[in-house]
């Protein structure tokens, strides 16, 4: 029996992916994490991927263990378990279409609109199609008229290949932050949602009857801040910006040692 401590109370672990589980350009979840997820589940501790990525993308990333875990997708707009939605928070259609037009009018910006199982793009540069389909690995549908898309919009994203500059960030934040969550997601993406990861975590806790005090969270970016603040135990990555680190209770340079400690305390 391992030593019992505060982490023995953890029942749900939510971790960001890019820059948190995937470090230094890695594109595959560490084997140790995949090995620990079912072991955690056996101890009554659920693991949740919390990301701005799409559900099919996340499901493929965690393919060996996807049915033993949970998913907060699209920065909290979609919460999934075993292919079933536990929560869906779509964007208002008029706001979405206005925002899409403003992104398309902005020099150097590409727009991506997220549905549940695919993304819709209207690329200025053919290389953007290749990036989304072959690097990000989203199912991408070319779209001439976003108003003709029938399914709800879960997230609208602006992509700048050379990185989102401060002027672009401030311009969109000034126009939209009173109505939508506006968050940098890595260097090249600016995401707009009604939800954020904290709302996804709250919806998950409500659905599973788990107090937020009994949750743990890991993240590295500004779209993780709400989740880090909400969780009873939280770690920001050591390379995260100071404001992100300030939202967490601790810092770490890798997630795996913390997962091992949680597992050891549960045994």
Image (spheres, rainbow, N blue to C red):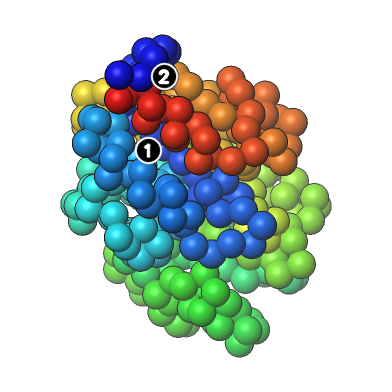
Considering every residue shown, the one lying at the far front of the view is 1
Picture coordinates of residue 83 (x, y %)?
A: 21, 56
**Residue position marked by numbered label 2 in the rendering:** 7
**Residue position marked by numbered label 1 in the rendering:** 200
Picture coordinates of residue 142 (x, y %)?
A: 45, 82
Q: Nearer the viewer, residue 46 or 78?
A: 46
Q: Is residue 12 above or below residue 9?
A: below
Residue 103 relative to residue 262: left or right: right
CA gap between label 2 and label 1 equals 22 Å
At a point 74% along the width and 61% down the height, the residue shown is 163
At a point 23% along the width and 30% down the height, the residue shown is 44
Q: Is residue 259 visible?
A: yes
At a point 52% along the width and 35% down the height, the residue shown is 257
Q: Is residue 105 above or below residue 216?
A: below
**Are there few (<14), some (14-19), or many (20+) residues within 10 Å of tag 1?**
many
Q: Nearer the viewer, residue 124 or 66?
A: 66
């Amino acid at each position: 029996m391992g030593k019992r401590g505060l982490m023995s109370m953890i029942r749900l672990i939510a971790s960001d992916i890019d820059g948190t589980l995937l470090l230094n350009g890695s594109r595959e979840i560490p084997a140790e994490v995949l090995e620990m997820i079912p072991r955690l589940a056996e101890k009554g501790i659920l693991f949740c991927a919390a990301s701005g990525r799409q559900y099919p993308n996340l499901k493929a990333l965690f393919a060996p263990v996807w049915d033993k875990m949970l998913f907060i997708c699209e920065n909290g707009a979609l919460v999934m378990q075993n292919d079933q939605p536990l929560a869906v928070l779509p964007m208002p259609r008029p706001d979405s279409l206005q925002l899409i037009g403003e992104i398309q009018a902005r020099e150097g910006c590409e727009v991506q609109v997220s549905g549940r199982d695919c993304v819709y793009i209207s690329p200025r540069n053919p290389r953007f199609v290749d990036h989304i389909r072959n690097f990000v690995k989203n199912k991408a549908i070319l779209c001439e008229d976003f108003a003709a898309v029938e399914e709800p919009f879960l997230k609208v994203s602006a992509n700048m290949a050379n990185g989102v500059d401060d002027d672009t960030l401030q311009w969109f934040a000034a126009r939209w932050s009173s109505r939508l969550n506006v968050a940098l997601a890595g260097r090249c993406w600016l995401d707009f949602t009604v939800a954020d990861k904290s709302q996804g975590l709250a919806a998950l806790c409500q659905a599973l009857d788990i107090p937020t005090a009994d949750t743990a969270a890991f993240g590295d970016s500004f779209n993780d801040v709400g989740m880090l603040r909400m969780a009873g135990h939280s770690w920001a990555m050591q390379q995260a910006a100071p404001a992100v680190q300030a939202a967490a209770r601790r810092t770490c340079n890798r997630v795996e040692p913390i997962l091992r400690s949680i597992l050891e305390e549960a045994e």
